[in-house]
Amino acid sequence: MKINIKRGEVLCYEIQAKNQTLLEVLNEIKTTQDSSLAYSSGCRSGVCGSCAMRVNGREILACSYHVQDGDLVEPLNNAPVIRDLVVDMDKAYGFNAKAKAYLSADIDNILITHEEQKINELQSDCILCGSCYSACPVYAVNSEFLGPFALTRVWRYVSDKREQNPKEKIDNIQTNGVWDCTLCNACTLVCPQGISSKADIEKLRARSALVGYMDPNFASFGFSGGFDGSPIF
Amino acid sequence: MKSVIVIGAGGAGLVAALSAYENGAKVTVITKEYPTRSQTSMAQGGINAVLSEEGGDSIEIHIQNTLKSASALADEQVVSFMCKEAPNAIRWLDSIGVPFSRNDKSKIAQRKLGGAYAPRACYAQDYTGLKILHTLYDRCQEAGIEILNERYLLEFITNKDNNNKSFVCGVSVLNKRSGEVEAYEAKSVIVATGGYSRVYHDYSTNSVSTTGDGIALAHRAGVRLSDMEFIQFHPTALKNSSILISESARGAGGYLLNSKGERFINELLPRDEVARAIYDEMAKGYDIFLDIRHLGTEFIENELPQEAKLAKLYENVDPSVELIPIKPAAHYTMGGIEVDKNSSTCINGLFAVGECANHRVHGANRLGGNSLLELVVFGKQAGENAAKYICDFDKKVDLSAQKKSFEDQIIKIKEFSNEINFYEKQRELGELFYKNLGIKREKSAMQALLNEVKEMKAVLPKMGVSDKTKEYNTNLIEFLEFKNILDLSELVLISAISRQESRGAHFRVDFPSADDKKFKAHTIIEERMVSYED
């Protein structure tokens, strides 16, 4: 079987593989054919988020994808390629801090019901693999967009009963945040954990509306005349 | 000069960093990958704490369960401290937002793990480690703690004070991206680099990064190690890939079967006993399977979704109708850097915490649910003590010489002849370790393996790297990891050969019972020599 790996230029490797994961195949190439091949991996079981890359244009985890003859393997999009399949995730991860994706203050002994726990159970399954970040088309026009995983993380804390100042979190995601998303759903389709950042962004929009924010795109179509994007109370 | 440097961004490293920060220190975390990608993310089961005595559980019973599992090799005082601190540890994790699963009273839910008297492990579905780790990371973002990603540890740099006592004064690292050696001066360094299960290579459940770098390098810097021969094997890893199938599959009623379809052991006995029973069946030539078919499709989908997914992906079986082929695999290393009751090593200013450290709480066999607990309790302690230590630090440091020496060493390694493919040797070493230093051990086989390891070390200059590139050279990083693995292999072997008894995870076919008179003591390694201490 042949697979093609984009390493600057596309190189073709002949491999013996049946029912193997892409990560196993990469390991085989690295240890027996070409040890200069660069990629990242860790847990091999889909929880560490190290081995996200693209196959035939779609984001996958190499440890969770079975190789097919003729596959084209490429690094993630929207992040600078360091070498071969390795990209620099520093800027992407930096959006977590910019989005203030954390509990704003310590809080003791809050009771949380099953239902309250379920609100962000799925969102806290995120492994920060960066697949959604790579698939998101908004970065083509706005490189400062907080982006899918960071906004999902904001929802994870905004919806947490322990968060004492959710409004501050909502205030913080009005610029380069929830309204910049086009709701195209590309992030949802590639998430290995089944998280829908698009849905989380919609929930954050609803929360934003509750505290008086409006969709600036909608507003600029003349609905509220001189609306300048600042909150309406 | 940096104040406190933490090496490693897993659970232990991030707790230590937060704790040092909260105690007033300026902290820098250095990791060879990114935070959230560490071994901690793989912990599924839970974190032990007695939160209420309603069900008959008590802190005293938690202490006793831990000591029993440790086979008389844990320090009662330290275990007692850890178990008493456990409820505070959970309270803190809850207060920073860890999304623990909840019970019907809206409190943190707990489940029973092997060796525990009562449901005591707090959990977050199947993702306990992942959710704790990510919440710690978020907390570090809130605190604005500096994290330097993708830097591989090369050395702990030490110096001698006026009383001829060693103190740490910095670290040198290889920046993976630029390929440059960087030296960071620091008043204090906390080692939180994880265990060494990848000595077993393909026969380990662990992340490929669990190569024991911090332990090997700390020993090179003069730090004492202890109890290195105690390595926990998990009974149920997938046969081909060694990927972990959680204990919850057996906890829920899964069976272990041999190729004749017969059960051969009570599946809920402690891990070491179950692993030995599987080993014996495999020695008879049987394949071993985990059978969860009778639990029903719905139960498997709801309660064991990760397990079902991994079995399908790696073994191509559907566990609701087929058997899952398994084998035991190296899972957790109890030994490591010897620390005192303050999490301090024998080098001033150098602290250690997490799986790389030996706080003497796991002894010869770790109790499930105690490793996440350990990293929170002692991570806090290490951070506090590092912050305290730096207040009195008044020494001047210049690391330019060390930096140069490491640059030269990297250049030299790149000139190694590369006649022998080290990846092959690494695979071979893992297999030999599994066979001869695995679940059952015997002197002559271990001695032969020790000779093999020494031989591999001797031919290292004939190995080396074929990739001479400077930027992001993972071939080079993996070779440096292999060097550390070889170093640790030797230390594990001399410890295991020397301990002529069976205790916990260390089972000697030639000495099948415990010998309390001679060996109810900790194995200490100092300058590659073995001795025993109470």
Image (cartoon, grey):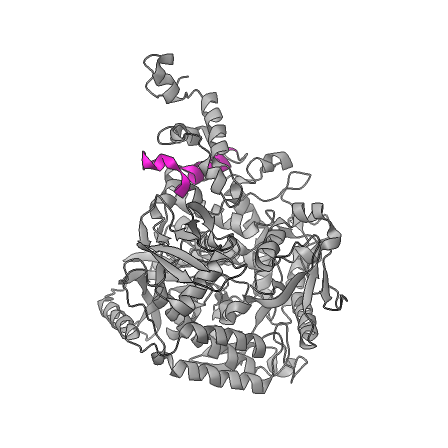
Q: Which residue is drawn at 52% across and 66% down?
A: B359
Task: Please state which of residues B260 and B431 is positioned toward the viewer in this rendering.
Answer: B260
Task: Please state which of residues B490 and B361 is positioned toward the viewer in this rendering.
Answer: B490
Quarter of the image containing the N terminus of chain B? bottom left
Residue B139 locus on image (x, y percent):
44, 45
Q: Using the rendered image of the protein, determine whether residue B511 is visible from the camera's viewpoint.
A: yes
Q: Which residue is drawn at 64% across and 78% down?
A: B502
Q: Give the range drawn in magenta.
A: A133-159
Q: Quick check: B225 left or right of B58?
A: left
Task: Please state which of residues B179 and B215 is positioned toward the viewer in this rendering.
Answer: B179
Residue B153 locus on image (x, y percent):
36, 64
Residue A43 locus on image (x, y percent):
50, 58
Task: Please state which of residues B381 and B116 is positioned toward the viewer in this rendering.
Answer: B116
Quarter of the image containing the C terminus of chain B? bottom right
Residue B288 locus on image (x, y percent):
68, 67
**Magenta stretch: dominant SS?**
helix
Q: Quick check: A144 left or right of B300?
A: left
The question of residue A141 being in magenta is answered with: yes
Q: Using the rendered image of the protein, determine whether residue B75 is visible from the camera's viewpoint.
A: no
Q: Residue furthest bottom?
A: B444
